[in-house]
Image (cartoon, helix red, strand yellow):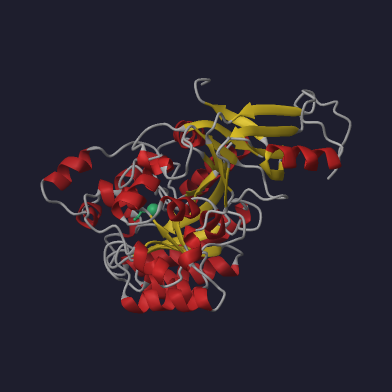
Amino acid sequence: MTTPAATASIPAGLLVEGAREVVTMAGGLRRGSSQDDGGVVSSSVSDLAVACWEGRVVACGPRDEVAGRLASEGLDPGDPARFVRIDAAGGTVTPGLIDPHTHLVFAGSREGEITLRRHGAGYLEILAAGGGILSTVRATRAASVDELVECGRRWLGEMLRHGATTVEAKSGYGLERDAELRQLEAIGRLDAEGPVELVPTFLGAHAVAPEFRDRADAVDAYVRDVVEVQLPAVAQQGIARFCDVFCEEGVFTAEQSRRVLEAGARLGLAPRLHADELRPSGGAELAAELGAASADHLGVPSPEGIDALARAADAGSPVVATLLPATSLFLKGEEYGPARRLIDRGIPVALGTDFNPGTSPAPNLQLVLSLAVLRMGLTATEALAGVTINAAHALRLGDTHGAIEPGRQADLVVWDVPTVEQIPYWLGAGLARAVVKRGRVVWQAGRD
Ligand code: NIG
Ligand code: FE
């Protein structure tokens, strides 16, 4: 650790003190019974501290131990030029939340589809009739990058104040080269603006573009466009880190998805999938075969798909199962995905908002934690692992993000409740007291 002279106006250190519980998530990816191990440190007298220096965690534990560790590094937490101090006031400290699946950047809204669904229309039926994703495509194509940035900024602010410090964000509402590039550019600009860190994903294969839909070979022709026109331009632009596909019967088959994901991988974009959301479509099997970073939704994976994910996890190449319960809630489905079965089979589970204007206008990961506990049978700790260390692994950030351990990026949330169990329990309440990104307080309750 370096200790340069404290000349900068912003102190390089941060000390969170007075916590009753720190859920560290130290020790790496959670799967099976370890998903319920939060690496919790607790103190009945609320004297726990977390110290950070130059954006990284330095120490965590009882206040005296942390002070001793800082002293051994020649750091005095009492020096206001060097340390910002925040009082956790008997609350809980967790790693900053990570949302591993969002469609953050779009234009317009789709509240009218609630009425269509009330009259019996299905999600894929609305899409086939030119609505759904395609209606957001029309609005997004018409928007400038500035407008996309503005819309994304609004919802990122909501995510932040509910504890999110890292958020994956997909394109997929352009469905043609230039509009996809504009979405990715907006994501890149929001990431540079901060404080929330964004992980960009290219999702050209989100639906078949309207220009292709009247052709007899519509889906294959559009897949060719994604592979031959969109992907090379996306790789050249250099913003996207992942390539995603909506692998679903009636959208892209497993075979078409494979073509897109393999082409993406050849260009350096790691694969992740929307898999088996509404029907078993071979998505989980494909994710395991390709060594995808994650298989998302998994509302109704086949038994073979679950077997394939379990084998990958046992073989040490886990594909994270990223479940999206706010989408199930919003589409009024009764099917929240087989979360317990996945955990019992040793498959690491993450949770995300799936924030988007059609199926999950929900920017709040705290709500997702509540749904995971109330509707999917997860414990509070299993759910929290799903939006911290396991979500970090789903984004291939598992070595640097998602836990409070010395050397890791200092992304933290100080919660206004004394135990992890109370985070999903106060349904819909805003419980974050302070949010810390790279060792700096970036949001505090009552100050925005
Ligand atoms: O993850 N399932 C596909 N894509 C999004 C929905 C996008 C939309 O309807 O606009 C999802 O739910
Ligand atoms: Fe999605």
**Residue 115 image-quadrant placement:** top left
Relative to 95, 366 lies left or right: left
Residue displayed at 56% across by 28% down? 89
**Residue 11 image-quadrant placement:** top right
Relative to 229, 79 lies left or right: right
Q: Nearer the viewer, residue 8 or 39?
A: 39
**Residue 64 image-quadrant placement:** top right
Horizontal and vertical percent position of residue 263: 53, 69
* Count of numbered marks: 0
Residue displayed at 33% across by 59% down? 212
> Is residue 238 at all visible to an observer of this figure?
yes
Residue displayed at 88% across by 35% down? 4
Horizontal and vertical percent position of residue 410: 66, 42
Q: Tell me the quarter of the image containing the N terminus.
A: top right
Q: Where 222 sits versus 432, above or below?
A: below
> Is residue 194 at all visible to an observer of this figure?
no
Relative to 57, 176 lies left or right: left
Q: Nearer the viewer, residue 437 or 74?
A: 74
